[in-house]
Image (spheres, rainbow, N blue to C red):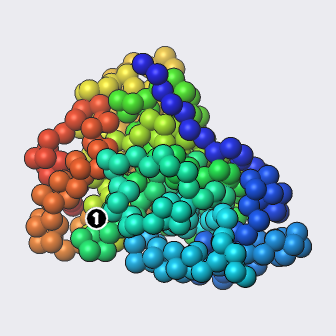
Amino acid sequence: MTHSIVLPRLIRTGSGALGQLPDLLTACGVKRPLIVTDATMVELGYLARLGQGLAQAGIKSGLFDATEPEPTETSVLVAEAILRAGLDGQAFDGLVALGGGSAIDTAKALAVLGPHGGRMRDYKVPRIVDEPGLPVIAIPTTAGTGSEATRVTVITDPDNDEKMLCMGLAFMPVAAILDPDLTLSLPPRVTADTGIDALTHAIEAYVSRKASRFSDQQALAAMRLIAPNLRRAFHDGEDRQAREALLIGACFGGIAFSNASVALVHGMSRPIGAFFHVPHGLSNAMLLPAVTTWSIPAAPTRYADCARAMGVVGDGVSDEIANTALLDELRALNAELGVPTPAGFGIQPERWQQLRPLMAEQALASGSPGNNPRIPTHDEIIALYDEVWG
């Protein structure tokens, strides 16, 4: 079996790396970028810092600063209009995404819609979009999605509340900047949700049926960086070492799942986010212990490796003990980081019960459950939704 490995062309890392954006744009051949960001980046002054660097380098740029959390096609279409309007009579030739996964996913969507048109539903899985898109330079300000290093974007269809999974080379950023200074302002809740998202990426990539030796190494490295540092960053947001470890770990996790795919947790998580507006990382966290428990019998050695990489047990411990420790750790992590159940989040039980069959249908349609070590039926997914409810 062969595996196709897809990566960004350039990644700049380290404190102050944001200042290297002009050089990175030049290296990527981008002269007129559209900046895609959100109001929080404006309020924190990050956009001003970015804009100052571009101005000093003589690079003119456009701006879309209305990215919404868990982006829908509605906001993407507003941004697309700005993209098509161009700058000083000339077309934008690239995109700079500044923010969390929502800003980066929005920029990726624009990278395809700009040159190819249509609607995002035209590009969702099972279609694979390998046609060239506009170059994207991704600058994550959260340590979670790994979107700066993935060939995936997720946009919600407002007509039916479906989170559309879109994949292909066109969605892979050409470059990324990993500046841990941009993550110091993250509040504890966002730190927790994005951190567990990154941990889920790594675990699912490692146990995926599409895993390779390459993705395995990225996934294990991600777990080694994320697991010991997530609690540290959650309790002390100014812990720079922990912040940098999480940011690099999230990137490794993104590389891992972009090349090995995610699995059942993500398949079940996307509908929860779409229908109930639960942040993506939080819905992953709600599901991770139960789905891992259900999946372990099909890949006990793989999950035991995860426990060892996370530092939960030592190398000489048996798979059975390691897996018990892994489940204990996932539950303890949720408890310490304040992860609620769907009921605790405030979801109405009647609506949860009503939507379970449709959520299970959408989960299966995404293809992600088919990568799981243990492949579920529609009814088994419904049973897992019941298990995590309260």
Residue 380 position within the rendered picture, expressed as x and y whole percent measured from the top left? 14, 44
Lateral position of residue 241 relative to residue 2, left or right? right
**Quadrant of residue 301 within the rendered picture:** top left
Image height check: is 46 above or below 252?
A: below
Q: Which residue is mark 1?
A: 162
Observer able to see residue 322: no
User: Is 102 or 24 nearer to us in this picture?
Assistant: 24
**Which quadrant is home to the N terminus?**
top left
**Quadrant of residue 318 within the rendered picture:** top left
Residue 295 position within the rendered picture, expressed as x and y whole percent measured from the top left? 27, 35
User: Is 298 or 332 nearer to us in this picture?
Assistant: 298
Q: Residue at x 75, y 49 (%)?
A: 12
Image height check: is 138 above or below 207?
A: below
Residue 183 position within the rendered picture, expressed as x and y whole percent measured from the top left? 66, 63
Around disc 1, counting alpha carbons within 10 Å, would you say few (fewer than 14), some (14 to 19), or many (20 or more)?
A: many
Count every numbered label the image shows and give the total: 1
Residue 212 position within the rendered picture, expressed as x and y whole percent measured from the top left? 47, 26
Image height check: is 240 above or below 370?
A: below
The amino acid type of the residue labelled 1 equals Glu
- Residue at the limit of the structure toward the right, as seen here: 56
Q: Residue at x 51, y 31 (%)?
A: 4
Circle 1 SS class: strand
Q: Residue at x 35, y 60 (%)?
A: 122
**Which quadrant is home to the C terminus?**
bottom left
Lateral position of residue 159 relative to residue 201, left or right? left
Q: Residue at x 72, y 46 (%)?
A: 10
Lateral position of residue 58 relative to residue 143, left or right? right
Observer able to see residue 288: yes
